[in-house]
């Protein structure tokens, strides 16, 4: 054990107290009623960074909630990393389902229960504690460290891209290390190296200029629900594969190590359908193809459909309009605008005559993120995880969208390594969120080694 690790072990009780204080602050970003909590949490993070020894700490306003930026760059010649995390949390609702109050951190079974403790207050506090340990033991950091902590991650980071673009010159670094982004499974060490992108659109079909009586006009007037369902059903084949020309033609092949991980984990597809409470398809798809679809394939999903009368009873109407909301998860290589253009071309070609079609893209979308599989720092992180977790981590992808990797790549031209010590079973976003104290300890050792090993890569 290094002197820094010994110092961290000797100060475990204080570290836990600090985490509890942090978790008592109700920093819910989505609800304006928690404004005070947001301000307090930003100030708390800034205070901890100053206490740890960061010479420059600043609260950066955005049109929404502020970011906290800290810089400690006094290791000439050593690499510079940028640590990312977020101080905001999900709403605690439903509060009655909590066994202890969400903002009163409570220890049970070597786990700390509180809203935000696993996502992301515990994980983000770890690198700050490690910086404090380095200062106490060696007088400074072995490498240059910048820290950027945002306050709107749980409400979609609406101002983060612009904030990073605006701070571009100050955020220059060799690598981003994210303290956010949980491990896939508690029983399997993993490192997330890819996440799918997202683009949203709305499709509207119009017929007559107003709603019509289905007796007087039925059989002669255009029915937009009929046309809409017809064109929507042409987007997939019977097995659910997207059959839109050009939809995925730009997709790049995935990291072969992710494919190897998918083959290696024995994903239980029957268990999957039982867990989501859906009837089992027959024949049952094998686990490899299910996980491949969740992680590595683009999707086109209908999220909502509306038109005509959907209230109680019946109404004899031919509606004037019908529409559907669609989102697509994207894989690396796919460009959001091009995907929407391909879908528009397909729908226009399928539309029966006598209808008007409008396809509207909602927002710019987010391209997928994929880390360069050959990035040397990725191997450094994997070696450290293997040491502290006792098994080589799997390289996994994520079906959901984590925009930060793509935001940092585009604005700063660097990769992002996800180095979080929360696990996906810790009920973040749900009642009784908790963080394992063992992960809090292991995370400190791992981050201490990460600083040390990255510093030696000059
Ligand atoms: Zn998070």
Image (spheres, rainbow, N blue to C red):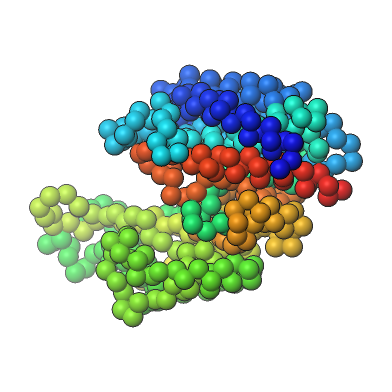
x then y, percent, for residue 83:
68, 39
Residue positioned most to the right: 77
- In the displayed structure, 323 sits above or below 101; it is below
**Residue drawn at 47 percent across, 67 percent down:** 291
Q: Is residue 428 left or right of residue 127?
A: left
Q: Residue 365, can we see it?
A: no
Q: Residue at x 20, y 52 (%)?
A: 310
- Name the residue at 58% across, 25% down: 14
Which picture quadrant has residue 327? bottom left
Instruction: Determine the image quadrant of residue 86.
Output: top right
Q: Residue at x 48, y 23 (%)?
A: 25
Q: Looking at the picture, does residue 307 appear above or below residue 254?
A: above
Say which of 150 and 244 sits in front.
150
Q: In the rendered view of the protein, which quadrant contains the N terminus?
A: top right
**Relative depth, front residue between 32 and 57:** 57
Farthest residue toward the bottom? 283
* Vertical placement of residue 214 versus 114, above or below: below
The location of residue 288, given as percent across then percent down, is 48, 73
Residue 94 in picture, x, y percent from top left: 31, 35
Q: Residue 156, percent across and down?
A: 51, 41
């Amino acid at each position: 054990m290094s002197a820094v690790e010994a110092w961290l072990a000797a100060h475990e009780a204080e570290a836990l107290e600090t985490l509890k204080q942090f978790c008592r602050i109700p920093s819910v970003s989505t609800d304006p009623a928690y404004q005070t909590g947001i301000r307090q949490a930003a100030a708390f993070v800034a205070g901890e960074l100053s206490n740890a020894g960061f010479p420059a700490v600043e609260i950066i306003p955005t049109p929404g909630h502020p970011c906290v930026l800290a810089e400690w760059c006094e290791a000439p010649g050593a690499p510079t990393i940028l640590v990312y995390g977020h101080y905001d949390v999900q709403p605690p609702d439903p509060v009655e389902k909590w066994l202890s109050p969400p903002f009163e951190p409570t220890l049970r079974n070597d786990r700390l229960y509180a809203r935000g403790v696993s996502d992301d207050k515990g994980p983000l506090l770890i690198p700050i504690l490690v910086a404090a340990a380095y200062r106490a033991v060696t007088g400074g950091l072995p490498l240059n460290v910048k820290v950027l902590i945002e306050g709107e991650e749980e409400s979609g980071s609406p101002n983060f891209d612009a904030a990073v673009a605006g701070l571009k010159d100050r955020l220059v670094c060799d690598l981003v290390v994210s303290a956010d982004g949980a491990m896939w499974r508690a029983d399997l060490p993993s490192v997330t190296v890819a996440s799918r992108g997202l683009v949203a659109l709305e499709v509207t079909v119009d017929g007559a200029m107003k709603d019509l009586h289905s007796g007087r006009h039925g059989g002669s007037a255009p029915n937009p629900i009929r046309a809409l369902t017809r064109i929507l059903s042409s987007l997939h084949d019977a097995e659910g594969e997207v059959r839109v020309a050009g939809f995925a033609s730009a997709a790049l092949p995935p990291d072969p190590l992710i494919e190897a991980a998918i083959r290696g984990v024995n994903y239980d597809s029957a268990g999957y359908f039982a867990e989501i409470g859906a009837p089992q398809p027959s024949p049952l798809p094998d686990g490899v193809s299910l996980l491949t679809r969740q992680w590595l394939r683009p999707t086109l999903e209908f999220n909502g459909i509306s038109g005509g009368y959907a209230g109680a009873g019946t109404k004899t109407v031919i509606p004037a309009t019908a529409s559907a909301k669609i989102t697509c998860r994207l894989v690396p290589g796919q460009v959001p605008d091009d995907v929407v253009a391909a879908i528009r071309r397909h729908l226009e070609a399928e539309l029966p005559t006598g209808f008007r079609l409008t396809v509207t893209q909602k927002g710019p979308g987010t391209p997928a993120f994929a880390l360069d599989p050959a990035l040397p720092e990725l191997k450094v992180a994997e070696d450290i995880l293997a040491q502290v977790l006792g098994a080589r981590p799997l390289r996994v992808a994520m079906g959901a969208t984590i925009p930060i990797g793509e935001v940092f790549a585009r604005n700063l031209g660097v990769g992002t390594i996800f180095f979080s010590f929360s696990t996906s079973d810790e009920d973040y976003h749900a009642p009784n969120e908790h963080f394992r104290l063992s992960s809090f300890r292991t995370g400190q050792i791992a981050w201490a080694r990460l600083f040390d090993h990255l510093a030696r890569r000059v």
